[in-house]
Image (cartoon, rainbow, N blue to C red):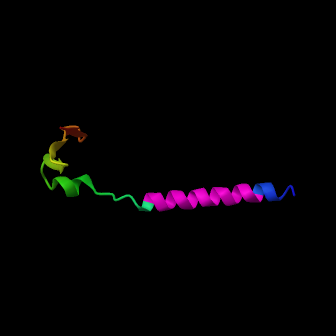
Amino acid sequence: MSHSIPREAELEKKQISSITQSVASAVTRIKSQDLFKQMRELEIDHGGRIYKLRLTHLNKLILTA
């Protein structure tokens, strides 16, 4: 009986790991250089509202409405 507790914990850990990997693979990753294409600012239309995504001189991103 004492062996079943560690096995259950190990199984649960594997299940959580599997779920985490599934969620991680569902996220799309886009490189910022592909978005900006040699520009420093782009506009995003989100539900009819325009947002500006800018690349600063320090290579940081700023999103404004």
Could you say which is closer to the camera, residue 45 or residue 48? Answer: 48
Q: Residue at 22% across / 40% down in the picture?
A: 63
Among the 4 quarters of the image, the one containing residue 24: bottom left
Provide the major secondary structure of the magenta segment: helix
Among the 4 quarters of the image, the one containing residue 41: top left
Q: Residue at 73% across / 58% down in the picture?
A: 8
Q: Is residue 27 left or right of residue 52?
A: right
Q: Is residue 19 magenta?
A: yes
Q: Residue at 17% across / 38% down in the picture?
A: 65
| Total number of numbered discs in the rendering | 0
Q: Is residue 5 left or right of residue 13?
A: right
Q: Which residues are magenta?
A: 7-24
Q: Residue at 66% across / 57% down in the picture?
A: 12
Percent across and percent down for residue 50 are: 14, 44
Q: Is residue 23 above or below residue 59?
A: below
Q: Residue furthest right?
A: 1
Percent across and percent down for residue 1 are: 87, 58
Percent across and percent down for residue 33 are: 22, 54
Q: Is residue 1 magenta?
A: no
Percent across and percent down for residue 21 are: 50, 60
Among the 4 quarters of the image, the one containing residue 53: top left
